[in-house]
Image (cartoon, coloured by chain):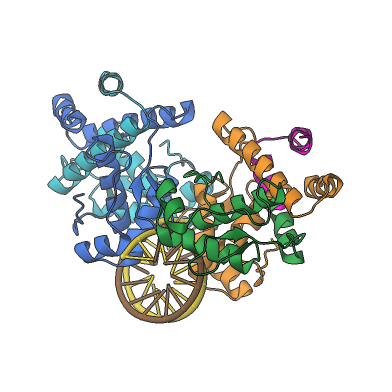
Chain colours: A blue, B cyan, C orange, D green, E brown, F yellow
Amino acid sequence: MFISIDERDSRPLYQQIVNQVKEQVSRKTLVPGDELPSVRELSDNLGINMHTVRRAYLELRDQGIINLRLGRKARIAGIKLQPAGDDAREHIRSRFTELVTDARLAGFTPDEIRVILEKNLRP
Amino acid sequence: MFISIDERDSRPLYQQIVNQVKEQVSRKTLVPGDELPSVRELSDNLGINMHTVRRAYLELRDQGIINLRLGRKARIAGIKLQPAGDDAREHIRSRFTELVTDARLAGFTPDEIRVILEKNLRP
Amino acid sequence: MFISIDERDSRPLYQQIVNQVKEQVSRKTLVPGDELPSVRELSDNLGINMHTVRRAYLELRDQGIINLRLGRKARIAGIKLQPAGDDAREHIRSRFTELVTDARLAGFTPDEIRVILEKNLRP
Amino acid sequence: MFISIDERDSRPLYQQIVNQVKEQVSRKTLVPGDELPSVRELSDNLGINMHTVRRAYLELRDQGIINLRLGRKARIAGIKLQPAGDDAREHIRSRFTELVTDARLAGFTPDEIRVILEKNLRP
DNA sequence: GTGGTCTAGACCACG
DNA sequence: GTGGTCTAGACCACC
């Protein structure tokens, strides 16, 4: 479990944690049943408040990524890989359209974009 | 000047306006010298607060996209869009990481993701 | 918007708020577009902490009941009445089985249970 | 003595044990004098912590369901189950309110809900 | 004015 | 030990 906080990142701290856990799950670095560090442990390691970590775990629970039960450590949930409904899939598609538009406006060439994508698709 | 507000879009209203103006400038739909609607006019048309439009215009002025002079209508400035700084490019990269993560968790295969990307790169 | 806190109720304060809003939505006392009191306003009225109300609003947002956007008041979302997948519907069914079992063990007669149900089905 | 733990059940482990014993007593599957497995034995079988089973037994003793004497095996006590106090009955009522709310939000019609109830009242 | 994030500390409940 | 709830107050961002 490697999680880090990037102070320069404008996203909220809890969001950074959520994203990193989700990424590791999607890359199979974390698999169902794996334990997450306790809220207190992780907050100590990252030097942030307990409640901020807890907020991240709550989000992950609500998104079905982890199981949270009183008195037990948080664990990666049994993820259903094809659960997304048509709405969710369509939403992902439109986010791609938007992102690619933004990337091109920011000066990325199609080939640069392809390279970025491939990097993210590996492992 | 076609500007619209998308309620489903999670970005702040003023951001949506800024982005749409910048996009039209980069597409040459708006060229230097073109007039923008007045703050009052645009806020009425969009049904949003005047302060919100004003804030968008201030942001555009700060980015050198438009000229704002007291008592005159806002006009597109004669300066080119910068090809986006390193921060902006890094931001785009992390949005790709996040989107690809979400897509994989939603059940998209790498090949499906590649297809979606190519479709968006075409036009 | 009538929301109240029952100190004798063992459920968490935020959960009581969530349940009451959901109930009013299901009874059409609250319809899409209706404004909710602001976090500070409701917490003052109920005599509880701002963050506790906020927690309730967050839950409601995650369940798709309300829209929460920075700087705007919370509003009842456009609820899709038949969105629940088969899993969700099956889950509801098993909760009925469990509740009816508990009710009979607690000494409720079938007729008493029917009366309770009808009370909850009205308006 | 068949007791099982349901990981999907949101209730605490000790509660699940307590409820199952009480249910078996009320169904006469367990009658006064029947032995319960030792704390050690049951915790091993269920793969849970000894403290958790111990807590369940203490709860059952406090409710007058079993006799616990140092050095002897736990046995079902000779006292009848109370038909549940007002608090318990009120609790059941509010669970109905909540369940019906969830069912309506999930798209169940009143008639569908009535049918589900009748099915559960039959056997 | 509104909601959003973060910190801090207390206390409770489960295992 | 673990997670869960509540309070309190600061500060930020959007409208």
Q: Residue at x 55, y 60 (%)?
A: D74
Q: Is residue C20 left or right of residue E3?
A: right
Q: Pinpoint residue C18: horizontal percent, then vertical percent.
A: 59, 56
Q: Residue at x 44, y 30 (%)?
A: A84
Left or right, C88 with respect to B117, comes to: right
In depth, the one of C39 and B108 nearer the eye is: B108
**Residue B70 seen in the figure:** no
Q: Vertically, is B86 above or below A120?
A: below
Along the line of sight, which residue is nearer the eye, A67 or E13?
Answer: E13
Q: Position of residue C61 (x, y in %)?
A: 51, 50
Q: Which stretch is magenta?
A: D96-123
- On the image, which quarter does residue B96 sit in? top left
In the image, residue D115 lies in the stretch drawn in magenta: yes
| Residue B42 position (above or below residue A50) | above
Q: Position of residue A54 (x, y in %)?
A: 36, 60
Instruction: Identify the main secondary structure in magenta.
Output: helix
Residue E6: quarter of image: bottom left
Residue C79 visible to the viewer: yes
Foreground pick, A2 / D24 = D24
Residue A52 figure quarter: bottom left
B109 within the magenta span: no
| Residue A19, image x, y percentages | 29, 46
Q: How many marks?
A: 0
Quarter of the image with the C terminus of chain D is: top right
